[in-house]
Image (cartoon, rainbow, N blue to C red):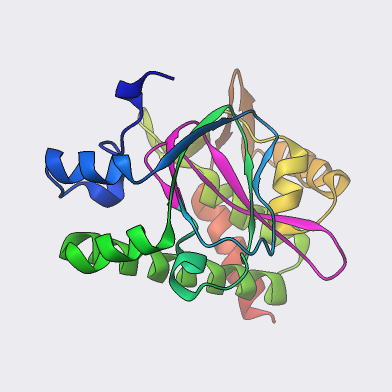
Amino acid sequence: MSRQAETLAKIGLFRSLDAAAIRHLDTQCSWRRAARNTWIIDYQDPSNDMFFVVSGTVRVKIQSVSGREILLTEIGAGGCFGEIAAIDDRPRSSGIMAVTDVTIARMPASVFRTAVHAHPDVCDQVLALIAGQVRMLTNRVNEFTTLDVRHRIYAELLRLSRPEAARSKQRVISPPPVHADVAARVSTRREAVAREFKALEREGLIERRRGAIVLTDPEKLQRLIDKAYELT
């Protein structure tokens, strides 16, 4: 990797910093590449460094009491992870795996905390990041404790989808998720996901296209989820 690529300049957390401040932080980091499907941090790892995704994508996973891995979210280039351990100096609350080949910057917790205290915008973004995680986890706990597998799958499809420009009422997921990934996100088995996908296709609620899955009536999916909540 070229020295020019070893920079935090495109990391969203540092958007307000000038070039000199970025260069200073760059010198405080160590840089590494990780191959796809390799673990970057293990669950309950005792380290407390902060990490920034310079290129590629990583997944955040936790392990249930039964040993099943649950996929929480993905973090792409410009994102970061490790802030909880960097703040409270306790073992990692989740594991991080590379989805693609990635380039990672590793920053000591002390450097990260100094940057947070020195730059108000960085502090505000860290607070917003943590607040977003709390909201996400609260929603996931609510889904796991309230909804059955079918409706958890519906909720995950809506979460993964984006508006389709040509048809504003439809939403698209591209690339299409594999069944095993959806299963890991909603804590079920791949066979259950395959069964629900087939049922959604029969009902005309999803369509498979080259390189994508289209949610033809996302509003109906949301109504089905809302009704499931009402019946609990």
- Position of residue 172 in the picture relative to residue 192 (left or right): left
Give the answer, above or below, for where 213 lies relative to 136: above
Q: Give the residue at x 24% y 59%.
A: 122
Residue 154 at what x, y percent from top left? 64, 54
Image coords of residue 184 (percent x, y): 74, 51
Residue 29 in the image: above or below residue 167: below
Decide which of 100, 132 is in the foreground and name it.
100
The image quadrant of residue 216 is: top right
Quick check: 200 above or below 178?
below
Comparing 132 with 78, the one in front is 78
Q: Decide whether residue 209 is among the magenta residues.
A: no
Q: Which secondary structure dominates the residues rendered in magenta? A: strand
Q: Quadrant of the C terminus?
A: bottom right
Give left or right: position of 160 versus 118.
right
At 60% from the left edge and 67% from the top edge, which residue is drawn?
140
Image location of residue 228, percent across then percent down: 66, 71
Which stretch is magenta? 51-80
Image position of 91 with respect to 181: above or below:
below
Left/right placement of residue 76 relative to residue 38 reads left
